Each structure stands twice: as C-alpha cells, then as structure tokens.
Amino acid sequence: MRVPSRDSPHPVANKRSTRETHDASRHVPPSLRAEKICASCGRPFSWRRRWAKVWSEVKYCSDACRSAR
C-alpha cells in the first residue's frame, strides 16, 4: 500500500498527527515544577496538573494528610 505524501491534494494525507503538533515547550520536567511543604507531614510535594487552578490554596500533599490535620 502506498502512503500519500505531504504534498498530496487529499486533506487527510496532509493532516499531521497529534504527536507532531504537540507543543513540547509546554512540558515542564519534574525537577523544575513548583514545590510546597505539606502542612501536616512536612514533606515536600510538587505541582500537579489537577491543582493548576487552585495551586495557591493547596496546603496538603494528600487526602490522608488533609484529614489528619
């Protein structure tokens, strides 16, 4: 089976895969992520994507630490 080239008039053949269009500059390695100290256990924990909108309010590293206050 012949694979169409990027110059093909067919629109699907010219579409790039999501890997090719992914912006690698958005990825932050774990060593450069923001860190905080857990208010309960005192251990450091780093930024997580799920905490992006509420990072300023996050005080505990886990649900267990939050409930142990």
Image: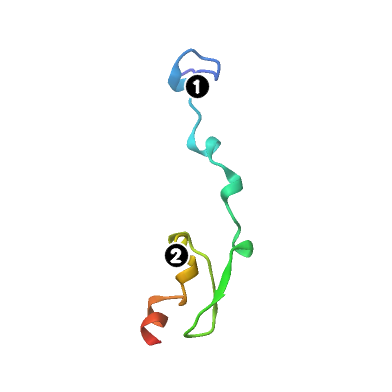
Give the labeled residue for mark 2: 54
The three-letter code of the residue at mark 1 reads Asn
Please, which residue is most extreme toward the top here? Answer: 9
Q: Can you say whether 15 is above or below 39 in the image?
A: above
For image coordinates 50% across by 20% down, the residue present is: 3
Query: Residue 6 lies in what quarter of the image?
Result: top right
Q: Nearer the viewer, residue 27 or 16?
A: 27
- The spot of residue 65 in percent (x, y) is 42, 82
Q: Which mark is residue 14?
A: 1
Which of the two marks, 1 or 2, is nearer to us in this view?
2
The three-letter code of the residue at mark 2 reads Val
Could you tell me which secondary element the residue under label 2 belongs to? loop
Q: Residues within 10 Å of mark 1 (few under 14, many from 20)?
A: few
Q: Nearer the viewer, residue 38 or 8?
A: 38
Could you tell me which secondary element the residue under label 1 belongs to? helix
Query: Residue 31 lies in what quarter of the image?
Result: bottom right
- The spot of residue 42 in percent (x, y) is 53, 84
Q: Residues within 10 Å of mark 2 (few under 14, many from 20)?
A: few
For image coordinates 49% across by 33% down, the residue present is: 17
For image coordinates 43% across by 61% down, the residue present is: 50
Q: Can you say whether 8 is above or below 15 in the image?
A: above
- The spot of residue 34 in percent (x, y) is 58, 66
Q: Can you say whether 48 is above or below 3 in the image?
A: below
Quarter of the C terminus within the rendering: bottom left
Q: Which mark is residue 50?
A: none
